[in-house]
Amino acid sequence: MKLKKFAALFIAAAMSVGTLSACGDKDSKTESRNDTKSAAETSAESKAGEDDTAEGTPVSETHQNDTMTPTSAVDLVAQMTNGWNLGNTMDASGNGLDAETAWLPNKVQTNQYMMDRLVEAGFNVLRVPVSWDGHITGDDYQIDPAWMDRVQEIVNYGIDDGMFVILNTHHEEWYKPKPSEKEQDIEELKAVWSQIADRFKGYDEHLIFEGLNEPRLRGEGAEWTGTSEARDIVNEYEKAFVETVRASGGNNADRCLMITGYAASSAYNNLSAIELPEESDKLIISVHAYLPYSFALDTKGTDKYDANDTAIPDLFENLNELFISKGVPVIVGEFGSVNKDNIDQRVACLDDYLAAAAKYDIPCVWWDNYARIGNGENFGLLNRADLDWYFPEMMDVFKKYSDSDPASAS
């Protein structure tokens, strides 16, 4: 085991003192590491020495003078391999910095070493879902500076490892595409994105903004299917997002932005209703697709993967028809399959999924919510405490597609 990993274990343990919870999801691998403490301390001290030059520099001042290489969205996406979501973390509900670990079983805070493990495994896309709602105050929708700083620290972990980083607005209960709420929603959307865009305007092309996450009629009968009226309003939200970012200055005039349709749905009627908010080569379509649904997402569904199911190939054929063939790239911002103690089936599904995506040069970003066992949606791949992979067989599939020419990986 590398010394860098020992250091991460030591730091993670220090962060977790006094906050560990007894949870059925806690991995059995977690155990005493007194025999590695000396090596961990040595490596941690070495790492601290490396960071001495940056000590005292406010995080808000980092990456503010990066040189942007204007890149079309098609060319940018072509550089991407596999992606990973930092799920159930900065998107958790709550106020203050404790929200970061509110949904995590062992309260391990995000750190640089997690990103290192991702890169080693062939991931070069990090999606950082962030819920801002609990960290906004006042009629002018001001974001808590401490929360903004912590988000920026995590973005930097990915940027400093050479990754492409996607930053979004995630579990936002305040946007709901209805005529009665549209005006206030757009007002808040502009206020929030103007602050995010201003903070990150110095970052280069490796940072991508995603305006909305699954915008939908929450709690209503058409929540996931949508209505024509709601789809049109989502398009208005996206237009406000793009205009706000473009007006913020710095490198944001040339930044690639991700556009989502109603609920980020993979349904054809929702995808086909997407209207691009500007004429440029800097837009990327975002879609979420846990397929086949009964196998991949439904916790009460089947644990058997049917290779003859057409859901996966149909999705990518639709994405090609609607966007790829027209020069508009696509990123599957969320996908995955729930752990049902069916590793062979999940490996087969993952291989077919990534093979279908590779035909059209579409990166796919796995939803990792750090949950592995239990009755919920268990998508966890990375053991963030031990920096091990729960399912090495699945990691072999990811590595296959990161090491290969995407067009010929299958």
Image (tube, rainbow, N blue to C red):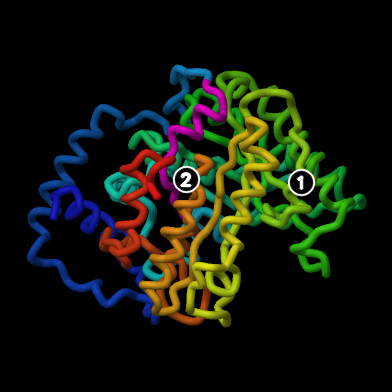
Label 2 vs label 1: CA separation? Answer: 22 Å
Earlier in the chain: of badge 2 and badge 1, it is 1
Count of labels shown? 2
Residue with the most extreme right position: 180
Q: Is residue 85 magenta?
A: yes
Q: Can you say which quadrant of the picture contains the N terminus?
A: bottom left
At horizontal 79% and vertical 41% (from top left) the residue drawn is: 235
Q: Residue 221 placed where, x, y %?
A: 83, 70
- The residue that mark 2 highlights is 358
Q: Within 10 angstroms of label 2, few (less than 14), some, or many (20 or more) residues?
A: many
Secondary structure beneath label 2: helix
Which segment is the magenta one?
A: 71-87
Type of the residue with mark 1: Ser
At horizontal 40% and vertical 50% (from top left) the residue drawn is: 410
Is residue 121 found left or right of 137 in the rendered image?
Answer: left
At horizontal 37% and vertical 29% (from top left) the residue drawn is: 57
Q: Is residue 41 magenta?
A: no
Front disc: 2 or 1:
2
Type of the residue with mark 2: Ala
At horizontal 32% and vertical 67% (from top left) the residue drawn is: 390
Q: Can residue 47 be seen in the rendering of this structure?
A: yes
Residue 272 is marked as 1
Give the image quarter of residue 282. top right
Q: Residue 266 placed where, x, y %?
A: 67, 55
